[in-house]
Image: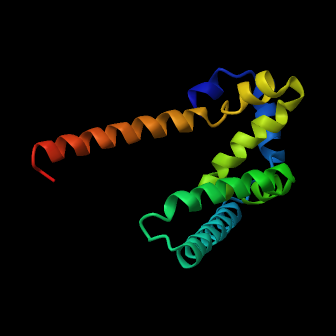
Amino acid sequence: MSNKQKNMTPQQRNYQQLQQKHEIKRPVLKNCVKAFFVGGIICVVGQAISYFYIYFFNFTEQSVGNPTVATMVFLSMLLTGFGIYDRIGQFAGAGSAVPVTGFGNAVISACIEHRTEGLVLGVGGNMFKLAGSVILFGVFSAFVVALVKTLLVIWGVL
């Protein structure tokens, strides 16, 4: 018996046992498989968009990343606006939140939620409430990597 359970009254222990008896077990393996496949489908769509830009707009494999990411974020925002991405997120969980499309969903969800407060204070003030930390740490880490690379080039290592 753990130390926490020793400090419980008999009534609290009975409640804990009743709670554990009626607790719904989560299908962890099933959720992981769904997240894996939906995340994979999102990545396949991203790869198809990359090939589209390479084939029709003569991008190189090195330069196609930026328009592909912008298109994926735009598509996720569009699907969120129509309520489709939320259903995908409920089904797939982290499979839809981890790719860059989850960033677009986070930004536009805050905008939709606060649109009744006006464009400036509602949408503009809350747009990056959920995604602000992603932007902050992304920019900071890019700065650190660029600084390290610059120093390595100056020192002649690269």
Give above or below for 134 relative to 81: above
Give above or below for 94 relative to 18: below
Q: Position of residue 84 (x, y in %)?
A: 84, 57
Determine which quarter of the picture holds residue 149: top left
- Residue that appears at 66% across and 53% down: 73
Determine which quarter of the picture holds residue 131: top right
Give above or below for 56 relative to 140: below
Q: Position of residue 66 (x, y in %)?
A: 52, 57
Q: Can the viewer see residue 155 in this picture?
A: yes
Q: Is residue 61 left or right of residue 21?
A: left
Q: Can the viewer see residue 94 in this picture?
A: no
* In-front residue for pair 25/131: 131
* In-front residue for pair 59/15: 59
* In-front residue for pair 145/96: 145
- Residue that appears at 80% across and 25% down: 122
Q: In this view, does 72 lie to the left or right of 15?
A: left
In the picture, which quadrant includes the N terminus?
top right
Q: Where is residue 137 in the image (x, y as percent from the top left)?
A: 47, 35
Q: Position of residue 82 (x, y in %)?
A: 87, 53
* In-front residue for pair 12/34: 34
- Residue that appears at 80% across and 46% down: 23
- Residue that appears at 85% across and 25% down: 118
